[in-house]
Image: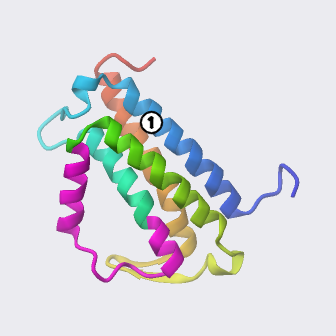
Amino acid sequence: MTQTQQNLQSFLARATAKAAEDLIAAVERVPDDKRAWSPMGDARTVLDVAAECAILNGSTVNMLQTRAWPAEYDFADYEREKAELAGKGWDAVKALLNENTPKAIAAIKELKDEDLGVEVPMPWGNFTVAQIASYPYWNMCYHEGQANYVAAMLGKLE
């Protein structure tokens, strides 16, 4: 494969790794004492959005491997897990992000081209394997933006 030729899996693997690096950099622009701070009302904290990425990067692996939404999945349990992780602070969130992201990347790389269009039933409709594989990248980019917005509000974004 030449540098200009790549499949979706290769692109997503590289993009996911870069998105994790960028998310970490964005969170670390926010001062330690503001990472658990909500900029207004019910707005999510930087730790909360980063904890989401850390947890869901791991969950994505299972869905890519099984092609199924976990039957035992409970949104209330997820919210508790996320709050507990965020409550442990940035070091714990970053450790899980750094643990689960390479697993997601490996699962993405293992996908066969012919499986990318397979549809997986989800609570909100069917998603293709390709859409599920793109989720870690998309989600971390989205939340990087939120972290950078908080950093900008605090005068920490250059």
| Quarter residue 26 falls in | top left
Q: Where in the figure is residue 126, as x and y percent of width and height?
A: 43, 80
Please name whichever residue, 60 or 39, is drawn nearer the observer in this view of the structure.
60
Residue 150 vs residue 14, the one in the foreground: 14
Task: Identify the residue at horizontal 46%, vertical 31% (top origin).
Answer: 25
Query: Where is residue 21 drawn, in percent x and y?
Result: 52, 38
**Farthest residue toward the left?**
41
Q: Is residue 115 left or right of residue 34?
A: right
**Mark 1 belongs to which amino acid?**
Ile
Q: Would residue 17 be found to the left or right of residue 43 on screen? A: right
Circle count? 1
Residue at image location 52% in from the left, 73% down from the top: 64
List the single residue furthest toward the right.
2
State the image coordinates of residue 84 (x, y, percent, origin top left). Answer: 20, 50
Q: Position of residue 48 (x, y in %)?
A: 26, 45
The question of residue 130 being in magenta is answered with no
23 horizontally vs 12: left or right: left
**Residue in the image at 36% along x and 56% along y:** 55
Disc 1 crowd rating (10 Å Cα; few below 14, some 14-19, many 20+) is: many
Q: Is residue 117 above or below residue 46?
A: below
Q: Say left or right for 77 vs 9.
A: left
Residue 8 seen from this side: yes
Q: Which residues are magenta?
A: 60-86
Camera-side residue of 107 and 1: 107
Q: Please say if 60 is above or below 129.
A: above
Mark 1 = which residue?
24
Magenta span dominant secondary structure: helix
Considering the numbered disc 1 on the image, is that residue within a helix, a strand or a loop?
helix
